[in-house]
Amino acid sequence: MIKKVRLFHKFALIMTLLVVVPLLIQGIRMININREALEVSVLETHTQLARAIAEDIDDYVSGLNLDLAFVLAFEKFPKMSWQEKMKVLLSVLSRYDDFILISVLNRKGDEVIKAHNPSFLQESSRLISRSKEPAFIEAKMTGVPQVGDIYYEDDLPCISVVYPLEAEYEYVFVTATLSKLWRKIDGVRIGKTGFAFLIDSEGRTIFHPELERAINFEKVTELPIVRQALSEFGTSIGVDISGEGFRNENGTGMVGAYAWAESLDWGVIMQQAKSEAYSSIARMKRNAVLWIALSILGSVFIAFYLAKSLSRPILELIVGAERLGEGDFSYEVKVNTRDEISTLANTFNFMVKKLKEFQEQLVLREKLAAVGQMASVVGHEIRNPLGVINNAIYYIRTKLEGSSGRQLDPKIQKHIGIIEKEIVASNKIINDLLGFSRTRPPMAQPLDLNKIIEDSLSAVSIPETVKVEIDLSLELPPTLINPDEIRQVFINLINNAWQAMPEGGTLKIRSYIEEEMAQVEVTDTGCGISPENMKKLFAPFFSTKTKGTGLGLAAVQRILERHKGKVKVRSRVGQGTTFIVSLPLAK
């Protein structure tokens, strides 16, 4: 009992450590991996949104340039009359509702013609000078289109664009509204706290969901992400790389990303409250901790269950080993775990069974060794008197027939025949005893096995009710055998075959080559052999006949083993039996 408890606790502790420690390590590692992945995903979302807004701004500027290029499509525009130019300008305004007004400037920057979009509040139709406009001054110097600074008129975001014409003294001046672009940017939201705002290259707010801050061009350089964006001015995109985010003017922790519009010096700042952005990370941590705790509890429970399941069959094996050590071969270890331990228990039981069989075989071999020694002595001692008796009977028969000159008295003839028959039977018993008791390798030589089979068949008196069929292969090469011993093998098998057919039948003998060995089949159509008798068919002294020593088949097996051959048998009750003899070919 003490061993069982100690073994159980060892198993429980080891299994708990093997399960819990890796689970904790892997759980913490997976939490960190998922946290980092979620953080990257959040920042990637912010970055993509900032980039998308920057691309929308670039697309808007490109659209303005394309719209103004419509005017340049008229090659004769500089040579048109003022009335014709006005028609072109009004056509442009009617097609592009983002344009508030469009005018043509001379080389000094003075308006020479102007058209208003009726959808907006009309300015004075009086022609004014645009020479002080920074966009005009830059376009005049560079000869390329220029976009002016953003400004607000009655909460309406506006921008000016100056487009030089082919004529050196004329420019197209456009005032356009950014309302559609602003509404589009304002519609980009992440959750409840995530939004975008725009800054210029000086860190001033030019768009913000809180419009007042944009109208006042509020400076936001105190925000770390704005300072970072300004320090990397000219870089297309970026994120807050500190990993800790930043705090807005209210002290709220934020995370975000930025992107610069390539066509303008405008920066897009995308920000969101850190608590909201990383809320999924907090939920993931809580769920992960909960599942890890539940997994640990479940693992501990399973570990204790497995420890108990493992220790119990091992203790059962220990009891079985102790009983085996005491010489008890009847004890059977019963384990129903259906795993490797069950296999071990079955192997242990099989080992005990085999040990018992080996012990029985060892006892039997000791007995057979003694019997063999006795059989060898008895065989030699009896064979000599039998030879003398046989010679004496032959002499008596010869003298009686010679002295009377006529046939012997039937009674005398009958008794002499009985003596001769019993001498033959006794010789067979002696041959079986000697064949069973021999242990030395046979004096083998290459011989024609078919000839040995024919000799054996002629030496056996087979009843007329038994039909003999012979199919001997003419291609059978010489076989390495001792002729006398192999002849005894076939005589025993042929005798057994016809004796198994008391009512008559067919005896078939066939020879052939298979697996580089000579094969001989002796088949009868007799009563067959039951499965119970098949197991002990070659056991010494086993016989189903009323007469016989039970050494015939045992001698057959012993002789073939000494010739490095073997014998197999297949039988079906009521249909017959086939003995298959295999012998090595002579090389």
Image: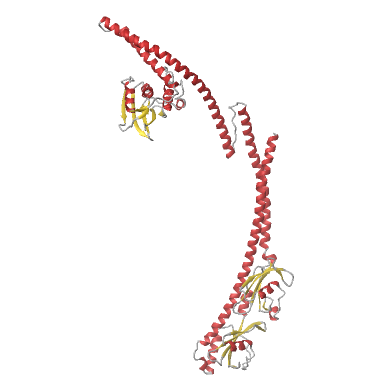
Position of 390 compared to 348: left or right?
A: left
User: Where is the C terminus found, in terms of image quarters?
Assistant: top left
- In this view, the residue in front, 273 or 481, is 481
User: Where is the N terminus found, in terms of image quarters?
Assistant: top right
Residue furthest left in the image: 405
Q: Residue at x 63, y 33 (%)?
A: 318
Displayed quadrant of residue 375: top left
Horizontal and vertical percent position of residue 542: 45, 21
Position of 61 compared to 456: left or right?
A: right
Horizontal and vertical percent position of residue 183: 62, 76
- In this view, the residue in front, 567 or 486, is 486
Above or below — where is 162 with respect to 54?
Answer: below
Number of numbered discs present? Answer: 0
- In this view, the residue in front, 211 or 291, is 291
Above or below — where is 348 with respect to 299?
Answer: above
Displayed quadrant of residue 471: top left
Q: Is residue 539 visible?
A: yes
Displayed quadrant of residue 206: bottom right
Q: How is the image coloured?
A: secondary structure
Above or below — where is 504 with respect to 333?
Answer: above
Horizontal and vertical percent position of residue 374: 47, 17
Horizontal and vertical percent position of residue 58: 58, 78
Q: Residue at x 60, y 72 (%)?
A: 51
Residue furthest top in the image: 404
Residue furthest bottom in the image: 81
Q: Is residue 409 visible?
A: no
Above or below — where is 37 with respect to 378?
Answer: below
